[in-house]
Amino acid sequence: MMHGQEFVDWYHRKFVNSYPKSVWPTVYNDHRALVHVIEKFDVKTILEIGTWQGWTALLMWLHPNVEALTTVDIHKDMNIPYDHAIHHLQDKSFYGEYCKFTPVKQVFQDSMTLTEDIGHFDMVFVEGNHDYEHCKHDTELALRIADKVVAWHDVWNIDTVAQVVGYVPDCYLVAGTLVAYKPMKDKPRQEIMFGDEKIYVGIDNQIPIVDKT
Ligand SMILES: C[S@@+](CC[C@H](N)C(=O)[O-])C[C@H]1O[C@@H](n2cnc3c(N)ncnc32)[C@H](O)[C@@H]1O
């Protein structure tokens, strides 16, 4: 059974290498970081907010530890009163395309309407609309329903995401990537005072960063 870098290399050889890198959203080292988080926290169930084409959902679902994955995105025909985040200019007919023949559960819903009714998951991966209000909403929800870990993408390259994630206590940045995570297990659930105090407890240097351009 493959794990860690061997698993990510296999996935990238099999599914990614033909993909145009200019539109690849979550790149190799970020995938390494997510797999690191899945293994570190023994994650078996995942909620991803923000499917896009489903590449990262496919990666996470294929990981041997993962038993179930639910991923949420808006539907291409959904009429929502705000921009669709960073992929608003791209073809929306492919949402979830790359996991549609897998048991990944695709939910078409505006994340702003998601509540705790969606259930609990070992890990919630927040990568939906990158606006401040959406990221804050999705983060607050994630912190209530994740039992082991919450992870985010684009944590320092997009200001609005940085403004939210930067205020989540006890967050770790995975060195050399756009991924941060917060361990949930055995931690009291905290109400977060956004804008009150900025704390990153550390940098996680545990994965070897590879220059794979
Ligand atoms: C950065 S992409 C997600 C990339 C994906 N996680 C991956 O790694 O391939 C952000 C996604 O969030 C979706 N999104 C934007 N606003 C949303 C909303 N209000 N509710 C749910 N999804 C939303 C967009 O349609 C887009 O597909």
Image (tube, rainbow, N blue to C red):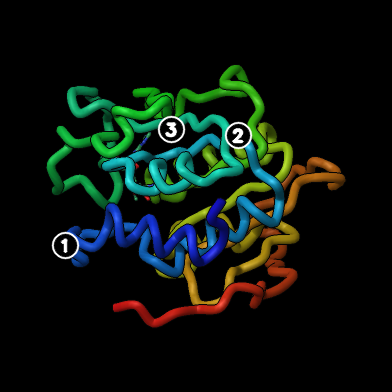
Question: Relative to 56, is 23 on the left or the right?
Answer: left
Picture residue at 47% right of the left edge, 39% below the top: 61
Q: Which residue sits at x=50%, y=77%?
A: 176
Residue 186 vs residue 110: left or right?
A: right
Residue 140 showing in the rendered view: no
- Identified at 53% across, 38% down, the residue is 137
Residue 92 at x, y percent in the picture: 17, 37
Q: Is residue 200 above or below residue 86?
A: below
- Real-space Cα separation, disc 1 to disc 2, in angstroms: 30 Å
Relative vertical location of residue 70 with respect to residue 29 in this rendering, above or below: above
Q: In percent of the image, x 61 and y 43: which residue is there?
A: 65
| Dot 3 or dot 2, earlier in sequence | 2
Query: How far apart are the two marked residues, 3 and 2, measured between alpha carbons?
Result: 11 Å
Amino acid tagged 2: Thr
Residue 20 image label: 1
Residue 52's spot in the image, x, y percent? 30, 42
Residue 2: image location, x then y, percent: 53, 55
Residue 50 shown left or right of residue 87 in the figure: right
In which quadrant is the C terminus drawn? bottom left
Q: Which residue is mark 2?
A: 45
